[in-house]
Image (cartoon, helix red, strand yellow):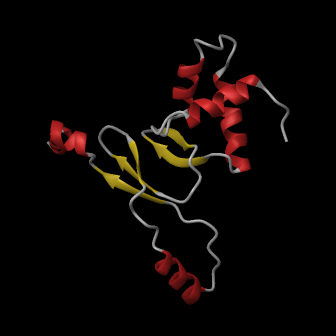
Amino acid sequence: MPRYSYKREAILNCLRSTKSHPSAEWVFAQLKPQIPDLSLGTVYRNLSQFKEQGVIMSVGVVNGLERFDANTMPHVHFVCEHCSSVIDLDNLDLPHEMLEMVQTETGVQISTCEINLRGTCKNCQVSGKNQELKN
């Protein structure tokens, strides 16, 4: 286990303090004013370690940047294809019956299930961004 580091703690606390599913660059921008000697490489290394340890999870790459979530409980994400926001859909249940059926029919053993839905968020629908991109 890595030794204690105030930078590591600050990175994890920053990630835990938001539901925006930030990128490493966003975390870096938030912390740089308080920690002037922080480097983007340090943020990347620590996020990678946290991910390997299961402390955080990756939501995947959105608009060219890997996005992270401090909530490691199984849940569904929605990714807006227009504004790149990532939204937790906590009210949706994961399809446990489907997972069991896949295991039974194929003989595989599923350890995790990640569902990312993509489309247009409410804000982009209201602002008409989804129409702008279609034209």
Going 42% across and 39% down the picture, which residue do you hit?
63
The tally of labels here is 0
Occupied quadrant, residue 107: bottom right
Viewer-proximal residue among 11 and 105: 11
Q: Residue at x 51, y 48 (%)?
A: 60
The N terminus appears in which quarter of the rendering? top right
Q: Residue at x 54, y 65 (%)?
A: 113
Q: Position of residue 118 (x, y in %)?
A: 35, 54
Say which quadrant the C terminus sits in: top left
Residue 95 vertical placement versus 92 (above, below): below
Answer left or right for 119 relative to 129. Answer: right
State left or right for residue 15 relative to residue 84.
right
Residue at image coords 16%, 40%: 126
Which residue is at the front of the view, 83 or 50?
50
Residue 134 rendering spot, x and y as whole percentages: 17, 45
Where is residue 74 drawn, in percent x and y?
A: 54, 60
In which quarter of the view is residue 10 placed?
top right
- Left or right: 62 with respect to 106? left
| Corner quadrant of residue 132 | top left
Residue 22 % position (x, y): 50, 35
